[in-house]
Image (cartoon, rainbow, N blue to C red):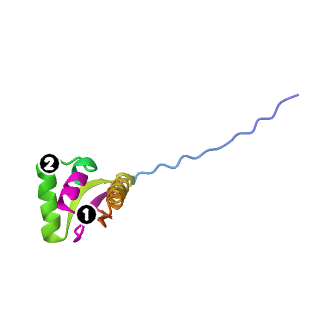
């Protein structure tokens, strides 16, 4: 008795148009309540900015209303923005950060 074998046919579709995932800017916005010291602390502890850079960014935010504080993959950008806002909320500050595609 001969055994019958099924022949399967699998096609592999090759993708040639793969793109690097987009990076996202984390933007910190100015408000009239959050202290400058707290903003510098967040920039140092969440975004790992050196003290001088954190102070410069804080002043840019204060003077212009907002500044890009980091550029990351989408997940990391959203996570850092949320962590900073959670820290602010714990201290009673209305600090706002947004993420937008680079």
Residue drawn at (24%, 69%) of the image: 33
Q: Position of residue 24 (x, y in %)?
A: 31, 59
Q: Is residue 82 left or right of residue 10?
A: left
Crowding near the residue tagged with mark 1, few <14, some 14–19, many ≥20 C-alpha atoms within 10 Å: many
Crowding near the residue tagged with mark 2, few <14, some 14–19, many ≥20 C-alpha atoms within 10 Å: few
Q: Position of residue 44 (x, y in %)?
A: 22, 49
What residue does disc 2 label? 51
Range of magenta residues: 19-42
Front tag of 2 and 1:
2
85 over 46 or under it: above or below: below
Residue drawn at (15%, 70%) of the image: 64
What residue does disc 1 label? 28
Q: Are marks 2 and 1 in contact (CB under 8 Å)?
A: no
Q: Which mark is residue 68?
A: none
Residue drawn at (14%, 48%) of the image: 51
Q: Is residue 28 left or right of residue 62?
A: right
Specify the quadrant that holds the N terminus.
top right
Query: In the structure shown, which secondary structural element does the residue marked by tag 1 occupy?
Result: strand
Q: Earlier in the sequence, mark 2 or mark 1?
A: 1
Q: Real-space Cα distance between discs 2 and 1?
A: 17 Å
Query: In the structure shown, which secondary structural element does the residue marked by tag 2 occupy?
Result: helix
């Amino acid at each position: 008795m001969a055994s019958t074998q099924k022949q399967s046919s699998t096609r592999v579709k090759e993708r040639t148009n793969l793109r690097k995932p987009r990076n996202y800017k984390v933007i910190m916005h100015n408000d009239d309540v959050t202290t400058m010291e707290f903003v510098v602390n967040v920039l140092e502890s969440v975004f790992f900015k050196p003290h001088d850079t954190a102070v410069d960014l804080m002043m840019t935010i204060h003077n212009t209303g907002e500044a890009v504080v980091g550029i990351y993959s989408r997940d990391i950008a959203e996570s850092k923005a949320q962590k900073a806002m959670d820290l602010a909320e714990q201290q009673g500050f209305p600090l706002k950060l947004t993420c937008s595609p680079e």
